[in-house]
Every structure is written in C-alpha cells, then in structure tokens.
Image (spheres, rainbow, N blue to C red):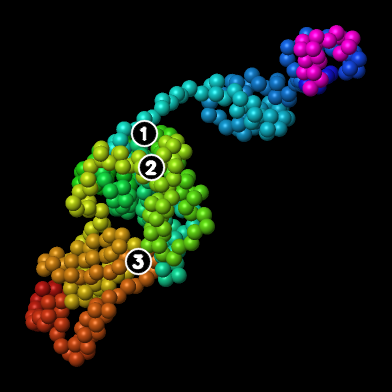
Amino acid sequence: MVSVQEWAEIRRMRFVEGLAIREIGRRTGLHRETIRRALRSQRPPSYARPARGSMLDPFKDEVHRLLDDDPQLESQRIRELLMERGYEGGKTITDDYVREVRPYYLKPRTYQRTVYRPGELFRFDLWQPSREIPVGYGQTRAGYVVVGALGYSRFGAGALIFSKEAPDILWGLWCCLCQVGALPGRLVTDREGALHAGGGRPTDEFAAFAGQLPVGLRILDPGDCEAKGVVERLQGYIETSFEPGRSFVSELDFQDQLERWFGERANVRIHRTLRERPADRLEREREKLRPLPASPPDTDRRFVVRVPPQPYVHVDRNDYSLDPRLVGRRVEVRVSQRELLAVALDTGELACRHRRVFAAGLTLTDPAHQLALDELRRRRYAGEATSAAGALEVELRELAAYDSLIPA
C-alpha cells in the first residue's frame, strides 16, 4: 500500500504534469497496477485493522434491556449483573459501551441560551475553602464564603461566614450587595436549608430580609444546578486564582484579601464570555439597579435570657461575661458577625459589649465585669447585704408556721 505522500505525488504527476503511467512507474519504482489504484482512489490511503468481535457482543441485548428498565443504572452494576450470566469481559469494555448507548434511553433535554437583562438578577451560593481559617487563640475553623454575581455584568463579590444558619448567610449576602453598591430586582439561590422552607417557598428569615430591602426572590427547582452557572463559574475561578498560594492570619485578613482580589483581579479582568471587564459592564448596569436602603436589614441573632448567678451567656461555643449587677434580670442578647451586645429589658442598661470571637472553648470576661464581681464578693465577705437591686430586707418566717402546715 502506498503512503499518503506517494498517493499525492502520483496524482500530481498524472493530472498536473500529464505523465504516462509507465513514466510514473519508472520515477517512483511502483508497479503499474499500484499506480492505477492510486489514480482511481479519490481518498488518501489509510490503514484500518479489521474489526474483531467483543466479549460483550453476546450480552449487548441484555445491556439494552437493563438500560430500558433503568436508564440511570450504573455501569458497574450492569457489569455485575452480566457476570451472573457468564460475562467475563473487563470493566473498560462495559463502561465504554454503556457510555455510548445510554443517551438513547435517557429523556432528551434541550437548553436555550440565557440572556440577562441589566439589573435583573443577583445569583449567590455558598463556597467552602479547602483550608480552615485562622480565628485567633491558636485555632482554625472551617468557613464558608457567600459568593454572589450579577447576571448581566458578572460583577462578583464574596463574604466569609462560619455557619450555614440563616443569620450568617443573610449577613454575607448583605455584605455582597454592599460591595456591589446597589440592589438588583431579584435574588436567586438554590434550595439551601436555612433559606428554603419547602415547596420553593423561602423561610421567614429570608422573606423578611428580602422585604426589608426590598427585592424579589427566586428559589431554583431541585436538580437545576445549571441555572447557577454564573456563580458556579465564579466559584471555580476563586478556587484556582484566589485561594492557592495565600496565607491568612485571621478571619478579618481573609475578608480583606478576598475583597481586594475581587476589586483588583476578578472584576477588572477581561471576562472570557463577555469579552469585556465586569467593572466596565457594571457601570452600564447601574442605570437599572436601585440604591441600597439607608439602614441595613436586621440579620442579627436575638434571644432573651435571665442573667444567671454565674453571669455568663453561652454563644457559639464560647462564654461571654454579663454585668453581675444584673443577676436575676432578663436581658436581650444580639449577636452579629463582629460583636455581641446585651441590654436589660426593663431599664435598657448595657449588660455587655464583646468583640465576637470565632475560636472555641473560651471564657471571655470584660474587665469591668470582673471588677464588679470582685466588689460584690468583697461586700459579701464583709457581711453586707447585696443583691441585683442593692440591699434588700428579707422577711424571715418562724419555723412553727411550717409545722402547722405540715401534718404530723
């Protein structure tokens, strides 16, 4: 068989130079019949090994039957069922054939090209860094990043949080909107447990957050992960461009580096799909966006406790001190991402103000609270009457009164 180069040269000498077959044979050293076959062939020569039968051939009908019953049946399980019928072929042969024929048994799905209108959608999702974040006191903690992106401009933002509870996610979402500096028409998310109440309905916390802004909500259908493509691709870019090669000293340092990366890298690069910078596209989109509200939505955790004799409140694996002079009184505790604040319900007195700590197993005592405890202890040892409200006169009942109430 002649090579492709010889085939091309034979045809050139015949159809371009007009040489006779005998002359072509003299120049190339090829037999006349070989030259004639090359001239008759309109396609270049190729070598093809004759097809051989596969060990899977006798079992292909069974493969089709199994896929007809369950198109999602795993290839490994199909092989196990075939081996019960005497199949001795390898895994690769089975996997390749199942991969080839499976599409014929699946319900076809088509996709339309998505076009985003300016100012319409802001998609967000949770991304978990591969390494834990330093949180002080020699500890690290697993964190999550609320990642958001505008549909039209692809302008992205992110905020670090340490749980998947609604207050944390909504705080992170508000931080992302602040980095954008404007409000979209609708927020789009998947069925995150803290935000989805079931049946495509938002939880009360998520609905209250949207109502305070106000913005519309859209919770995606189950299994519709393709609808999050904008933010999913941004998460992939964070994984490959932001996280590798960086180190962090605290959660605040992580957040600072993340915001600077968005501002100096992610939002000013030439976007592969848009062929322009998201920051430039955002300037055009701002005409359709609405301004942020004058006051932020309330995303703090709130609960009421009675100050115990040991005046501490337990929040997120740590104990924070309370004013010991308020023992026995009810206080409202507000927990944000940056501080913990408690106020007496009856008088509005400040019970505590602590910096939020994300390390674990700590007892955090305000120096002023420690001084108050020391003073109360000194007065108790001195025999002075003390209570939350000061010195109180307590009536002492005669023991005979109890004897008259309790039958002998």
Does residue 180 sit above or below 34 in this rendering?
A: below
Residue 229 screen position, x and y as percent: 42, 37
Can you identify the residue that label 2 sits on? 278
Bin the neighbour count of mark 1 within 10 Å (Cα to Cα): few under 14, some 14-19, many 20 and up. Answer: few
Image quadrant holding the N terminus, namely top right
Circle 2 sits in a helix, a strand or a loop, which is it? helix
Q: Nearer the viewer, mark 2 or mark 3?
A: 2
Any part of residue 84 in sight? no
Identify which amino acid the numbered label 2 is placed on. Answer: Pro
Residue occupying the point 53% across, 21% down: 105
Which residue sits at x=41%, y=25%? 112
- What label sits on residue 357 in the rendered view? 3
Horizontal side of 143 relative to 405 (left or right) equals right
- Magenta stretch encompasses residue 21: yes
Of the numbered discs 1 and 2, the one sitting upstream in the chain is: 1
Q: Nearer the viewer, residue 358 or 270?
A: 270
Disc 2 residue crowd, few under 14, some 14–19, many 20+, Cα 10 Å: many
In the image, 306: left or right of 401?
A: right
Determine which residue is flagged by label 1.
221
Residue at 37%, 62% in the rendered image: 252
Question: Amino acid under label 3?
Answer: Val
| Mark nearer the N terminus (3 vs 1) | 1
Answer with the quarter of the image where residue 323 lies. Answer: bottom left
Q: CA distance from mark 2 to mark 3?
A: 35 Å
Q: Compared with residue 48, is residue 264 higher up or lower down, i.e. above or below?
A: below
Q: Point out the stretch of residues depicted in magenta.
A: 5-24
Looking at the picture, how far across and down is residue 398, in whole percent?
A: 9, 82
